Amino acid sequence: MKLDDLAQKTGEWMRGDGPESDIVMSSRIRLARNLAEFPFVRKCTDKDRIAIAAAVRRAIDALPLSSDTEYVDVAKLGDLDRQFLMERQLISHELSETEGARAVILDPQERFSIMVNEEDHLRLQVMQSGLDLSSAWKRMNELDDLLESKLTYAFTKKLGYLTACPTNVGTGLRVSVMLHLPALVATKQIDKVFRAFNKINVAVRGLFGEGSQFMGDLYQVSNQMTLGKSEETLMQRVSEVIPRLIDYERKAREFLINEKRDDLNDGISRALGILKTAKKISSEETMHYLSKVRMGVNLGLIDNVRIPTVNKLFIHTQPAHLQKLCGQKLSVSARNTERANYLQQHLSDSVDPKAN
Amino acid sequence: MKCQHCEKTATFHITELTDPNGPTILHLCEEHARTFFNQDGPPDPASALTNMLAKQLKLEKAADDLAAADKKQCPMCGITFAEFRKGGRLGCPYDYVAFEEDLEPLLVNIHGATSHSGKVPKNLNGSPERQFRLKQLKDEMREAINKEQYEVAGKLRDKIAAIETGQNENGQNENGQSDESNEEKPNDGPPDDDFQSFS
Ligand SMILES: [Zn+2]
Ligand SMILES: [Zn+2]
């Protein structure tokens, strides 16, 4: 199993480059597809699920994909490996936790993954660093064409690609852009900004910790509708919103630099200090401070830390990653110690704002 | 407070900022919260959909209409409309045909549309009507064999073979393509036996 190799690396989508990558973490596109000859997953017998996985595997083997593309039988993976793939955003919670034959096809560079027997027979996913939906769609469309040449998809001219949930029927397309919006959060404008987007048919979600403590200041914007508009139009609806959000975030960052410079420096300096010196730290606290450090690096307030390193720390400090990286199962308490060690190793060269 | 998806304590409280019905708060344990950004729909599309369906259908349908719709059953996979409303997921592609009129208001509600415009696959053999016709013919053939009506069964076998090779039941080409479409057919499909599990 090459999952251990994967743990050492970070996927291309975490490189931290690409357009607007100081604010846009990643762009993702997924397509839901089903094989015409089988019922949807909830009505599949064990035999159906096995036959679907086998048909997909045959199709994949016959395609001109990179030779190190890997077919992973998820049913045979242990808890830690499944959680690891979830943290890496290569499989969903549903694929991890349901019973029966299921699989994921992994590109070693993590440019795409294909889930088999999730809610739909196939969930194709393409990932890209920064804001670059059009090249993500181009790669997705090619991958879909390849699979379609070997498999018969459930499709009608009226309703398009048929999916297990009517929320995905039509294009089966979900476009999502993950944004890092720490300054909008710090200036308490985030709710107001998103309320303004309420009526435009894009879904925005934020992740909050206990007591409204923000978790990493990460927000995801995605389309809600999948039927009645072309893939390009649906993508455009999401990508139209992004420059406005980027603009608001940049203005909020400028405001912090110009009007609240001491507070900003203090917050970033403390965040870096805690990450560098803590002896035990939870993943929630880590996300919270890493978010501030990420903004500090992007604003040129912290030296000797690179954005790809910060992006990597977001992923590698999660529980299953930590355990895979140190090669053993760890209790929550031992993980908090290991996480603090790991952060120190990677941030020891950093120079905080006071030194500037 | 317990996690909405399991028995663990909810330590994360996630706000859906753009839910059409106003902000909604989700209460999740660490593990379920962690997977939140992995998922591409709302965290639990099935329950959100079920709620919406239930609301909408109650508003628009009289109780006995709803009861009648709930009894409808898909002849391919056997799912009832009530089962779908409860679980939020359909049983097979043919449900879009079997429940067409009941699903339409739902599609309008979700997408503001009832017809697809977008990518079309090159291989159009995946329509649920075609799968349903194949199932019917196979059932008829099995019955003919049981009754030892071998001549009838033979004719049905020819019809099935014709459909499976991209022709219509009478052996004529459906899309005006040459007979070579037989070889172009990209997918062999599962062996016949698998259709039995589909009924
Ligand atoms: Zn939970
Ligand atoms: Zn059905």
Image (tube, coloured by chain):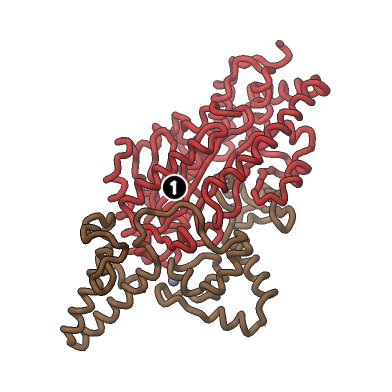
Chain colours: A red, B brown
Quadrant of the drawing holding the N terminus of chain B:
bottom right
Q: Is residue B86 visible?
A: no
* Disc 1 packing (10 Å; few <14; some 14–19; many ≥20): many
Q: Residue at x 79, y 33 (%)?
A: A187
Q: Indicate the quadrant of ligand 2 in the picture.
A: bottom left
Q: Residue at x 49, y 53 (%)?
A: B118
Q: Residue at x 30, y 55 (%)?
A: A55
Residue most toward the right?
A259
Q: Is residue A46 left or right of residue A326?
A: left
The residue labelled by disc 1 is A124
**A1 or A277: which is nearer to us?**
A1
**B149 or B79: which is nearer to us?**
B149
Q: Pointer 1 indicates a residue of which chain?
A: A
Q: Is residue A10 left or right of residue A301?
A: left
**Tag 1: amino acid:** Leu
Residue B50 image offset from top left, x and y in percent: 61, 66
Residue B185 image offset from top left, x and y in percent: 27, 57
Number of disc labels:
1
